[in-house]
Amino acid sequence: MEGGNGEGPAGGGATENSVERPPQQHHLIRDGDFVVLKREDVFKAVQVQRRKKVTFEKQWFFLDNVIGHSYGTTFEVSSGGNLQPKKMMEEITSETKEAGIDNRNIVDDGKSQKLTQDDIKALKDKGIKGEEIVQQLIENSTTFRDKTEFAQDKYIKKKKKKYEAVITVVKPSTRILSIMYYAREPGKINYMRYDSLAQMLTLGNIHAGNKMIVMETCAGLVLGAVMERMGGFGSIIQMYPGGGPVRAATTCFGFPKSFFNSLYEFPLGKVNSLLNGTFSSKTLPSESKDSISVGENNGTLLDDLQTSPKEIEENIIEVIENNHPGQETMEVISQEPEYKEHKEKGNKKDYIQEFQRKQEQQRKRQIEAAALLNERNADGLIIASRYHPTPLALSLLEFVAPSRPFVIYCHYKEPLVECYTKLRERGGVINLRLSETWLRNYQVLPDRSHPKLMMSGGGGYLLSGITVANDKQKSESCALELQKTEEPTAKKRKLQESDSTLENLP
């Protein structure tokens, strides 16, 4: 799975194979782990698999040799696409580091380098490493020694980036994955900058033991960030539109299987029925008309399997596509390796039974999620979706307990302004705050610390607040009770007249 492209199996399917590991092995890379490849400021999330070719920054290689090494190890791509741990490069001697006073006499005419492109290609064909090529470029440059020390460092850094195939394997985290998605494909995470995500986690008071409601369409990045901070303790209810949740970024975190035991999912289209008290488990997507042929009619389906396997295969593919519309990361069943293996062995019956089991398990989890929502005592609400936030906030805040925080993200300010107004009219919330974070990177180097020239124009807007008991609803209920207990006006008048007559008596 390539995290930078947002591709991967939807849901927690890929993480089902994750098992708990001893604490002393948490820092070691194992087969099947999800890792992030780093080169300079470029990141890419992949899964470690033996003999699987990976392409990264115009380099292809295999990840077999990273297994057993510690996270943070730097590797160099050798011949044949094998990765070898990189040794610490020796510092350039003071003789080579002779520097000029300024660059005024240096003319960029393209003739300062004696090595041609053919010479460099010949060096690569001989298997000479990148650092040796860089050293030869320095030695064959007629202007290198006349450059200032800063210009020399810049030259070396530029040539290393071009000729040294050096890759660092790091452990996935919220910060790394958010930077990766924002740099490569920000549209998949609704242009949410990493500092905005950090503000959401802080304002939402995310910690272990919480009961959180998360509604996001950011490829599962926000969900993964909440799961990472909660550490597998507490419960998370993910609200999703369409036929199923998208969790491509969540898969990149490589959480253990125990983390997903406390993760529930509930369709957004059933929220109104849940609020009205008309919700029924029979109306869940897994019990839809399309899935009845797979979920209930076992005998008919399995009998037909022997006579018309092609039709059955097409039916199951149609069911999966109907249950997961619009998910770019979801592959049809005929393309999955597990399906191909069963197809080759001719054992489709077992695979269909496994599919039925997963459908039933998903339905049970959704019923459990409905029961958790009906308690209406969630500890917080996180919304970060491409849909208008007002109807989502007004509906989902009904499931949040009083004195709990909520955070709503949107790439634009105007929808949050409308949401702010509607929440003020509705009541039941205090400390409403609409904010935008400002971020600027600084280069910190000796005698060269300054803001970077290129910076992000905006990272989105956040609307945060705290829920309280709605006084308007309380006052209305109290008024109704007073009207019921209060005596009629005519009877009141009679009582007043009788009291006045009694006072006039001698």
Image (cartoon, rainbow, N blue to C red):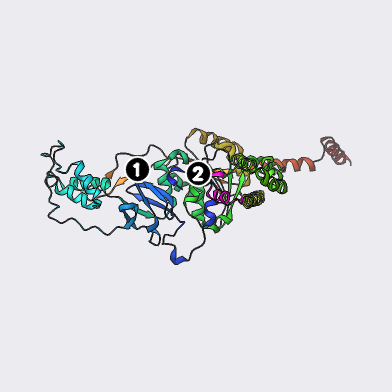
- How packed mark 2 is, by other alpha carbons closer than 10 Å (few <14, some 14-19, many 20 or more), is many
Between residues 54 and 135, which one lies in front from this camera angle? 54
Label 1, label 2: how many angstroms apart (C-alpha)?
A: 26 Å
**Residue type at tag 2:** Ala
Residue position marked by numbered label 1 in the rendering: 440
Task: Write the residue at 82% across / 40% down.
Answer: 487
Residue located farthest toward the front when viewing the structure as drawn: 307
Image quarter for residue 490? top right
Q: Position of residue 435 (x, y in %)?
A: 46, 40
Element at badge 1?
loop
Q: Position of residue 390 (x, y in %)?
A: 57, 36
Q: Is residue 125 left or right of residue 211?
A: left
Element at badge 2?
loop
1 and 2 marks in contact (CB < 8 Å)? no
Q: Tell me if I can see residue 122 in this picture.
A: yes
Q: Which mark is residue 219?
A: 2
Q: Which mark is residue 40?
A: none
Between residues 239 and 204, which one lies in front from this camera angle? 239
Q: Position of residue 63 (x, y in %)?
A: 39, 54
Q: Is residue 107 left or right of residue 468?
A: left
- How packed mark 1 is, by other alpha carbons closer than 10 Å (few <14, some 14-19, many 20 or more), is few
172 in the magenta segment? no
Between residues 211 and 307, which one lies in front from this camera angle? 307
Image quarter for residue 474? top right
Between residues 46 and 386, which one lies in front from this camera angle? 46
Say how many tags the image has.
2
Q: Position of residue 428 (x, y in %)?
A: 60, 43
Q: Is residue 490 left or right of residue 393?
A: right
**Residue type at tag 1:** Arg
Q: Is residue 348 left or right of residue 29?
A: right
Q: Earlier in the sequence, mark 1 or mark 2?
A: 2
> Bounds of the magenta span?
334-347
